[in-house]
Image: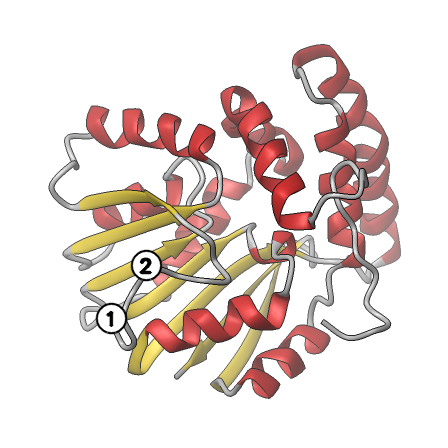
Amino acid sequence: MSSTERVVKPYDEGASKKSEVGRMFDSIAPTYDLLNRGTSLGVDTLWRKRLIAELDAKHELVLDVATGTADVAIQTILRSDAKHVTGVDLSEGMLAYGRKKVAAAGLDERIKLEQGDSENLPYADESFDAVTVAFGVRNFENLEKGLAEMRRVLKPGGKLVILEFSRIRYAPVRWGFNLYFGKIMPLIGRLQSKDPRAYAYLFESVQAFPSGKAFLKILDRVGYNNTEWQALTFGIASIYTATR
């Protein structure tokens, strides 16, 4: 993290960002899937399909970082040639919901969910053919350390695929999105969540995240190869790909 990068935390109470993020996701786990649908107006399901479409037949062992309630892990098994997905997340509350979804899908033998820190992954070097992250990297306390850890556990030639919200450059879309995401969603959060501050944080974290070309430069600096960026839905979100 550069000295000029603004640190955005859920509560700004003096604890580490990692600690506050874990606490926040534990608190909103019961409504997280609804939150995802709401913040993206349902388009996030299409974005996840685009993320998974970046995988191919050689990506048999996949690590899904910040797996949350296991949406990407489950869809990766159903929509790709992956043989096994390991999902890791800081929040045990989110994982509890994810395990219920994995069991309901009958995928306990092919998906393993574990609590862990994306910046200190509990896996050996060169363990996975691909690493995926959906809406998680902007929550890292140390972005470069997390990216370096994901590179470490990738096999040589392995692929990183990241889906993340972006700062929108097209003014009319930006105004509408900022109004909805920054003003309306926090109001909805106060009505349906025990932690309405989480809704405001999600918007603030998007504004602080170095999206687009700035994020590609960070991937390059960490040591990734073949870094590419695709804008989705007027630039509301982006897919970033890279190889080790």
The residue at which mark 1 appears reads as: 127
Quarter holding the N terminus is bottom right
Disc marking residue 243: none
Q: Is residue 58 above or below residue 92?
A: below
Residue 126 location in percent, x, y? 27, 77
Q: Is residue 106 above or below residue 114?
A: above
Tell me the distance, in whole angstroms, between the alpha carbons under discs 1 and 2. 9 Å
Left or right: residue 138 compared with residue 167: left
Q: Residues within 10 Å of mark 2 (few under 14, many from 20)?
A: many
Q: Residue at x 45, y 39 (%)?
A: 68
Q: Using the image as rendered, state which of residue 229 and residue 20 is in the foreground.
A: 20
Q: Could you tell me the amino acid type at mark 2?
A: Leu
Q: Residue at x 37, y 65 (%)?
A: 131
Left or right: residue 38 compared with residue 63: right
Q: Residue at x 46, y 78 (%)?
A: 242
Disc marking residue 63: 2
The secondary structure type at the circle numbered 1 is loop
The secondary structure type at the circle numbered 2 is strand
Quarter holding the C terminus is bottom left
